[in-house]
Image (tube, helix red, strand yellow):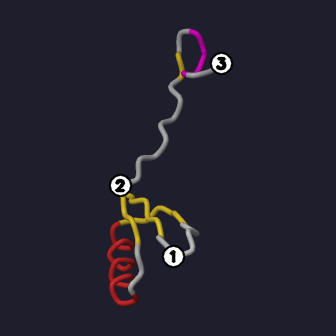
Amino acid sequence: MRFEITYLDADDDHVTHTADAAEVDALLAWAGRHGGKVRVRPHQPAAEPQEDAENGHTAGGTS
């Protein structure tokens, strides 16, 4: 499972990336030691367009 991590800086420069569970554990430990603020949410990858095999079109557009 992947997670979306956002670093919550005081200067509103929020940097977001995805990470696996091991990286989340390490990041939370680092934030606890240094007083950093982070937001962790489950990562939902964008769904790939489904092709309409009968017509050769993709959902939401044409091919």
Principal SS element in the magenta part? loop
Instruction: Please name the amino acid that badge 3 sits on.
Output: Thr
Residue at the extreme front of the image, as rendered: 11
Image-quadrant location for residue 55: top right
> Which tag, 3 or 2, sits closer to the chain's start?
2
Measured Cα–Cα span from mark 3 to mark 2: 31 Å
Q: Nearer the viewer, mark 3 or mark 2?
A: 2
> Which tag, 1 or 2, sits closer to the chain's start?
1
Q: Where is 60 relative to 40, above or below?
A: above
Q: Residue at x 53, y 16 (%)?
A: 52
How crowded pointer 3 is (Cα within 10 Å; few <14, some 14-19, many 20+) is rated as few
* Disc 1 target residue: 10
Q: Nearer the viewer, mark 1 or mark 2?
A: 1
Residue at the extreme right of the image, as rendered: 63
Instruction: Please name the amino acid that badge 1 sits on.
Output: Ala
Q: Is residue 47 magenta?
A: no
Kind of element beneath mark 2: strand
Say which of 49 and 42 sits in front.
42
* Disc 3 target residue: 62
> Which tag, 3 or 1, sits closer to the chain's start?
1
Kind of element beneath mark 1: loop
Q: Residue 17: x and y, percent?
A: 51, 63
Measured Cα–Cα span from mark 3 to mark 1: 44 Å
* Disc 2 target residue: 42
Q: Residue at x 40, y 75 (%)?
A: 37
Instruction: Please name the amino acid that badge 2 sits on.
Output: Pro
Q: Is residue 58 magenta?
A: yes
Which residues fall within the magenta stretch? Answer: 55-59
Measured Cα–Cα span from mark 1 to mark 2: 23 Å
